[in-house]
Amino acid sequence: MEQQPSSSSVPTEFSPLAQQEPPKNMGDLSKSYDRATIFFTRWGAHILDHILLACFLLGLLSLGISIAKDANALYFFILAAIILCSYYVLLEGLTGYTIGKFTFRIIAVNAEGQPPGLWKSFIRSLIRLFEANAFLLGGLPAGISVLASDKRQRLGDLAANTYVVKVKDLNNVSKKQTTVLAVVFSSVAVLSIISMIFGIIDLASKTPTEEIFYSKDKKLQITAPSDWSKDSALHDEADIAISNRISEKYLLILSDAKQNLDSSFTLQDYADFVEANIEDSVENVSVDKPIRTVVNNQVAIQFNAKGEGDGVKIAYIVTVFETPTHFYQIMAWTEQKRFDSLKQELQKVSASFREVK
């Protein structure tokens, strides 16, 4: 009689999770876990992933600042966003793991106990943006869902029909792939930490530089730190308009030709005119006593004002001065809560105004 080959001689398709034995019911397996235990395990994996991503982002931030003035900066940041979004979609979709999950020995699987695949992983990751976002309710919806759902699933799991289970409870997990992933994930974690270290060193060592901004006719200029940029959206008629919208600091220069004003119009009259405009356009405005300063080698009048615009509390530094042909107003502003820390910079930038000879 011809001998039949043993089952061990039949080749099996390589898979992250071998299927030599029938997989356990993932829903029942997930349901068997203690709520608090699986919650804190998933929470720990989530925190570790965020720490590593933050380290990576810090390194990218340093590189991004270095090339911010380059024409390819936009493409760089788009690439960075794609890499970050792919972290969860690709890793969980193809392996079931993130670095955090691998470290805490839990894995995302489909109903058959296999990695969920890219589509299910995309669904999980899309909903993660809302339910597990540290900046949106602190990830509270995901935690509540894991604790309250019958099978310990967050909202993304419910939508994608996936489960997070303990690796030790799965049948015949591939030791070879576990070793490979351990090496790869360890390398990625080390590179993220190195990226953070070099990012901190690079950011700390950067010497602030200054940039000169010109009016359209190149007759006026103002000097500001290099983190400022032109911002024509601030005012349609501004000679120069610059800002740093991330740091909420803004400045614009407006001019009025003397030939269009009464010949008796003085600098003090112009200062009163500018102050009246602010009082008309800003709610709950208060104006400090003006002081005398020097701008463009000319005597200038400067005053601080505070008020509200569109529900935002704003603080202004307003400087007015004259040349033989024009009156000028330099208006610099920021949020009131930032004013004390930015006041000196706003004053320095305002004082840097020059006419181009």
Image (spheres, helix red, strand yellow):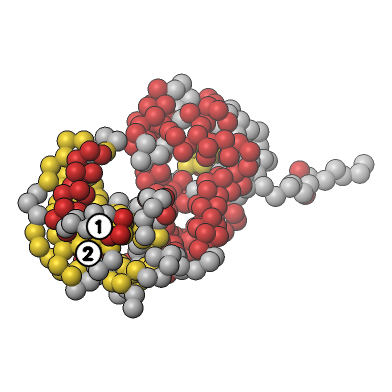
Residue 352 in the image: above or below residue 317: below
- Which image quadrant: the N terminus? top right
Residue under label 1: 329
Position of 4 with respect to 207 (left or right) is right
Position of 357 with respect to 111 (left or right) is left
Element marked by disc 1: strand
Marker count (numbered): 2
Residue 322, numbered circle:
2
**What residue lies at 47% left-to-right and 42% top-to-bottom?**
106
Q: Nearer the viewer, residue 186 or 139?
A: 139
Q: Residues within 10 Å of mark 2 (few under 14, many from 20)?
A: many
Residue 69 in the image: above or below residue 119: below
Q: Is residue 100 visible?
A: yes
Query: Which corner quadrant of the image does residue 116 belong to?
Result: top right
**What residue lies at 54% left-to-right and 55% top-to-bottom?**
78
- Which image quadrant: the C terminus? bottom left
Expressed as whole percent of the image width and height from the top left, the position of residue 136 reads: 37, 36
Q: Amino acid at mark 1?
A: Gln
Element marked by disc 2: strand
Expressed as whole percent of the image width and height from the top left, the position of residue 102 reads: 48, 49
Expressed as whole percent of the image width and height from the top left, the position of residue 135 reads: 35, 40
Decide which of tag 2 and tag 1 comes sooner along the chain: 2
**What residue lies at 37% left-to-right and 50% top-to-bottom?**
234
Query: Which corner quadrant of the image does residue 120 belong to?
Result: top right
**Spatial separation of the CA atoms under disc 2 and disc 1:** 9 Å
Q: Residue furthest left?
A: 289
Position of 7 with respect to 74 (left or right) is right
**What residue lies at 53% left-to-right and 66% top-to-bottom?**
71
Q: Is residue 342 visible?
A: no
Q: Residue furthest front?
A: 263
Q: Amino acid at mark 2?
A: Glu
Q: Nearer the viewer, residue 161 or 71?
A: 71
